[in-house]
Amino acid sequence: MMGSHGARPFAKQLAWDESIKVPFLISYPSIGKNKGAIVNAPINTPDILPSLLGLSEIEIPSTIEGENLSSLIKSPNPEIDRTALVMSVCPIAEEYIYQEYRAIRTKQYTYVRTPDNATMLFDNIDDPYQTKNLIGYDNFQNLYIELDAKLKKALQEIGDKNFKHRDYYLKKWNLELSNRNHAIDYFGFEEGKGVVQTPRLIQH
């Protein structure tokens, strides 16, 4: 199926737009003439809290992650671009067969890397259904270098620049996946055998 790139339509751990592109709608008391305005710059989930605090003119604690986009919300500009980080640290359930990855989505491009190599590059304006992977095309080499640098910068900001394979993080956070479905063993709870796992950092 083209709409799901060969995977089930509700596969939500892949980096294609069907999975990661979710509209963010916001209304606030002083929205005024900006009602219905569109901003094409992608937003990350961590950006929501600091942006709401910014709109409310509440001081943003230094421990809060994400970027305050309240100025962009107050003055919408569809031409503004930014980088949104997308991550699948450990694909689970049926998506377990796919590699873990880090990716960025800009207004125009999607770029994806696994721990081993770059795997996807799409021009989402010229190719909105993401049918042509540009990785490996010589005439897109400069774009690849530019997007790779943006991804590394985004990962460096969260301390994950040299990210590793999934097993490293499972061990680091002391988590175990079920051999039955490659996820936390939620079936065990139905059988009265479930074990609550709380991620904790194991000191090495």
Image (spheres, rainbow, N blue to C red):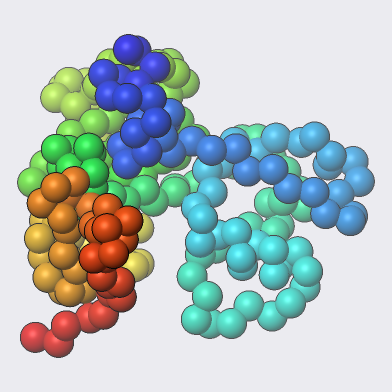
Residue 36, given in percent of the width and then of the height, sits at 80, 34
Q: Residue at x 52, y 43 (%)?
A: 42
Q: Is residue 65 visible in this depiction of the protein?
A: yes
When the figure is inspected, residue 61 is found, relative to residue 174, above or below; the finding is below
Residue 103, given in percent of the width and then of the height, sits at 31, 45
Residue 129 sits in which quadrant? top left
Out of 79 and 154, give the one closest to the viewer.
154
When the figure is inspected, residue 3 is found, relative to residue 95, above or below; the finding is above
- The answer to whether residue 167 is left or right of residue 32 is left
Q: Residue at x 17, y 58 (%)?
A: 177
- The answer to whether residue 140 is left or right of residue 56 is left
Residue 138 sits in which quadrant? top left
When the figure is inspected, residue 64 is found, relative to residue 128, above or below; the finding is below
The quadrant of the rendering that contains the C terminus is bottom left
- The answer to whether residue 136 is left or right of residue 6 is left
Q: Residue at x 71, y 57 (%)?
A: 71
Residue 112, given in percent of the width and then of the height, sits at 26, 39
Q: Residue at x 41, y 34 (%)?
A: 19
Please identify the residue farthest to the front as the structure is shown: 191
- The answer to whether residue 23 is left or right of residue 152 is right
When the figure is inspected, residue 139 is found, relative to residue 22, above or below; the finding is above
